Image (tube, coloured by chain):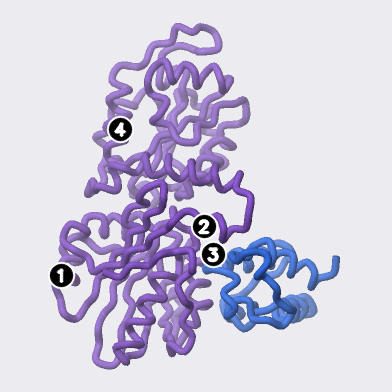
Chain colours: A purple, B blue
Amino acid sequence: MSEEKEVKCVIWDLDNTIWDGTLAESDDVRLKPGIVELIKTLDSRGILHSISSKNTHEETMEKLKQLGIEEYFLYPEINWNAKSIGVGNIQKNLNIGMDTIVFIDDQPFEREEVKAVHPEITCIDAAEYSSLPELKRFNPRFITHDSKRRRTMYLDDIKRKNEEDTFQGTPEAFLAQLNMRFVIHEAKEEDLKRAEELTVRTNQLNATGKTYDYEELNQFRLSDNYKLLVCELTDKYGSYGKIGLALIEIKEDCWHLRLLLMSCRVMSRGVGTVLMSHIMQETKKAGKKLQADFKTTKRNRMMYVSYKFSNFKEISSDEEGHILFENDLTMIQPFPPYIDVVIQ
Amino acid sequence: MDLKEKIRKFIESNLVVFEEEANFSDSDNIFEMGFVNSLFAMKLVNYIEQEFGITVDNDDLEISNFSSVDRIFQYIESKKSA
């Protein structure tokens, strides 16, 4: 079903794709008509852009700067390697699924080379560029505050990463000086679009892979039988946005965790168990037991490990990978000391 | 380097506490001591699988198999001889 997935990133070739002409032969290349507007349109929808181009890095970046479009491209791969290598690097850096990436190039050879190595990617002929904004996969159902800011948030991540790479000291010392603040609150109506977006976009740190639409989420929010929690992470660089979501069904003798997910962008921050610990603490306070739904997918093993290492035990499972967990709440991990957790 | 030393080196390189506080014996429970965070669990599992060519099954993913240098050592030994 990869054709159905919303596009998270477009990787562009440059010569005869973004512009007419070959930069290595002549500096006088001309942007394709409407291409800048198109890039900006997709950017405002929360779709990221990158580059895989066979050129010299410095000269090409200079050209992009001249053209005033350099800032739109994250992790550009401009070198003489096979394009599949560049595409692979971009995917790893952005930490998104290959089935959410589109590669655009005018040369069939390049498209085939990339597709052969990354079968889940979608390759599109550069001649068709002007039709992209109309395609369903380029039209997210909602455009949220977080989607509009997505590129900026990734640029902040690059700054964080650079600082981390050059930081002298233990990982904790690094995390401590980020001044992280993790806010957990019950979802308000204005959070629902983003909540839906999270259920659609999150694959790796997603316990059930279930998606819910706006109306369903709103019903949960208003119901006394459910709690819908949202969390936001900020640090000294700014906000990571709304990055976590949990849906809990309140039953007579137990709280049942129906959905738990966390954006992959915060994976490296060690905040993965904060929301889980909070729910465990609240369940214990309420004097209930805690159960949780889980559905095994190809990508969410990390979530399984998180549950198991948080002392959840499997009480039943079926052949399709559905698991029911239960936690006796005898061991609850404290919040990491380097994060200021705020419950609203 | 022997196996226990390898495991210790890996843990030490992933601690989230300041080095001067990070003294632990081979039998100390590193999770209870708050030396590691949620990310570490996954890193540790990946490390064991790649470094020692072991597949950690879901049934083995219990914190008790990974909570100290000794426990990890025993777990790897049991998988290698199996």
Which residue is tagged 3? B39
Q: Residue at x 24, y 75 (%)?
A: A227
- Which element is circle 3 on? helix
The residues bearing labels 3 and 2 have C-alpha atoms spaced at a distance of 13 Å
Which residue is tagged 4? A132
Estimate the x, y position of residue A322 in percent, counting from the top left: 41, 76
Q: Chain of mark 1?
A: A
Q: Amino acid at mark 2?
A: Leu
- Which element is circle 2 on? helix
Q: Nearer the viewer, mark 4 or mark 2?
A: 2
Estimate the x, y position of residue B46 in percent, counting from the top left: 63, 64
Q: Residue at x 59, y 58 (%)?
A: A171
Can marks 4 and 1 be said to lie on one chain?
yes
Which residue is tagged 2? A175
- Which element is circle 4 on? helix
First reached walking from the N terminus: tag 1 or tag 2: 2
Report if residue A23 is visible in the image. yes
Q: Residue at x 29, y 26 (%)?
A: A130
Q: Residue at x 54, y 31 (%)?
A: A77
In-front residue for pair B54/B16: B16
First reached walking from the N terminus: tag 4 or tag 1: 4
Estimate the x, y position of residue B8 in percent, counting from the top left: 74, 69
User: On the rendered structure, is A313 left or right of A215?
Assistant: right
Can marks 4 and 3 be said to lie on one chain?
no
The residues bearing labels 3 and 1 have C-alpha atoms spaced at a distance of 33 Å
Q: Amino acid at mark 3?
A: Leu
Q: Nearer the viewer, mark 4 or mark 1?
A: 1
Instruction: Rate crowding at label 3 as few (under 14), some (14 to 19) or many (20 or more) other CA atoms within 10 Å.
Output: some
First reached walking from the N terminus: tag 4 or tag 2: 4
The residues bearing labels 4 and 2 have C-alpha atoms spaced at a distance of 40 Å
